[in-house]
Image (spheres, rainbow, N blue to C red):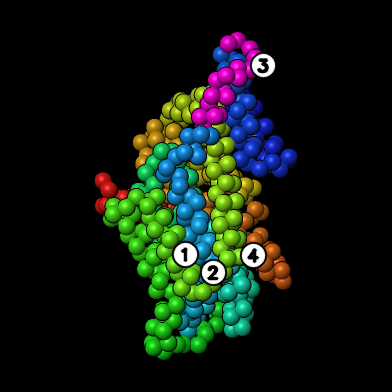
Amino acid sequence: MSVVLLGFAVLLLLILVVRMPIAFAMGLVGFFGFAALQGLEFGNLTDFRWSGVLSMASYRVIDTVQEYSLSVIPLFILMGNLVTRSGLSQELYHVSNAFLGHRKGGLSMATVVACGGFSAICGSSLATSATMARVAMPPMRKYGYSDGLAAASIAAGGTLGILIPPSVILVIYGLLTESSIRELFAAGFIPGMLGILLYLAAVRYVVWRNPEHGPAGDKMAWPERLQALKGVWGVLVLFTVVMGGIYLGIFTPTEAAGIGAGGAFIIALARRRLSLAILFDTLTDTARTSAMLFGVVIGALIFSDFINRAGLPDALLSLVTGLEVTPIMVILVILAIYIVLGMVFESLSMMLLTVPVFYPLVANLGFDLVWFGIVVVVVTEISLITPPVGMNVFVLSAVLRDVKTGTIFKGVTPFWCADIVRLALIVFFAQISLFLPQLLYR
């Protein structure tokens, strides 16, 4: 156990002090930690045994890059990049504004809905925040919205993308825990929609307390509203085909990702937003992001092999069993750890560090790993808007240079509270997450 604690200390040092990328930090600590454990088994901690650890690391690299199911990652990233390049964000916001903009706080509500729709296709919370800031902030300022409410609705709405399927972070969780990706996609749908509804309630609460923070905009007639829908019908059909095909078992997530990428390419061509230069940039950005994620996954798996070899999951289970606490109390403690970690770690790093440690314990306590995956992603969403390291907030402050970071954090408080309410509902009423997977696949 001392080797594991030393490994975690070195890992935190590399990430927080040396600022080493988490993929390399986890890979190095896992590699040398595994070698040290093998030496310890032969009676000497410093007697590193290279053959076994080299075999383990090479297996992880080769097995991961050859894993057919992981091809969903570059394909969904490509789909998101193509949709982003096609200029969909403006049309989604226009549609949302057409139906909600005439209400008090309506432009902020429209921003939340547009962020939810765009991030579901795009798959990146940070990209959604940066893109929607340029689209939604000017009209909200035009109608006199407070900077706190306007920026907070963008920051909070952007977090929805990592839960509403297709979600790359759910794919990575499924790989780490060997859970069904299609079940995870099904489980994320209702909590994602619940998140949008609670964010809308948070906006209504803000304008109820301070009506001047979100005055009503112009009301559009029904013909104008229907006209606005024409700009997004192609993407709505694509999303319905991709996710409907997965949910109904017509094709696998990998096949759905291929269909989604092909459909997004056709939409971008039809909208005349795709030149050879833009296509090249899109493909290189997809390759760069995919390589980064594959590197992170490989590093996390090597680190996971290390802590499993050291017996950390079994030690945690023995500790919890000895304390004689209820399983739900263990979950609450884990969630508290996540919220604290979210104040200093960005979301993907936090998930990769903790899931290999916690999921064996959660499984042994009798909890469903699909449900736990949704819980982890919701907590990860919360970390994106939690000070002092709320990544969405810092992305927004970089895009909106005239809005202070403190103003955004203050404005995002009602949305953070809404997320805590959603988290509590998902934890204590597991069927919110498990209803669709059980209905469709079990």
Q: Mark 4 or 2 closer to N-term? A: 2
The amino acid beneath tag 4 is Leu
The amino acid beneath tag 1 is Phe
CA distance separating discs 3 and 4:
47 Å
Quadrant in which the N terminus is drawn: top right
CA distance separating discs 1 and 2:
9 Å
Question: Is residue 136 among the parts visible in the rendering?
Answer: yes
Dot 4 lies on which element?
helix
Circle 1 sits on which residue? 265
The correct choice, above or below, for 431 with respect to 48 in the image is below
Circle 3 sits on which residue? 46
Circle 2 sits on which residue? 274
Give the label, 1 or 4, closer to the camera: 1
Bin the neighbour count of mark 3 within 10 Å (Cα to Cα): few under 14, some 14-19, many 20 and up: few
CA distance separating discs 4 and 2:
27 Å
Q: Mark 1 or 4 closer to N-term? A: 1
Q: Are marks 1 and 2 in contact (CB under 8 Å)?
A: yes
Q: Is residue 5 magenta?
A: no
Give the label, 3 or 4, closer to the camera: 3
Residue bounds of the magenta highlight = 42-60
Dot 1 lies on which element?
helix
Bin the neighbour count of mark 1 within 10 Å (Cα to Cα): few under 14, some 14-19, many 20 and up: many
Dot 2 lies on which element?
loop
The residue most toward the top is 43
The amino acid beneath tag 3 is Thr
Measuring from the top left, give residue 230's x and y in whole percent. Answer: 41, 79
CA distance separating discs 1 and 3:
54 Å
The correct choice, above or below, for 44 with respect to 441 in the image is above
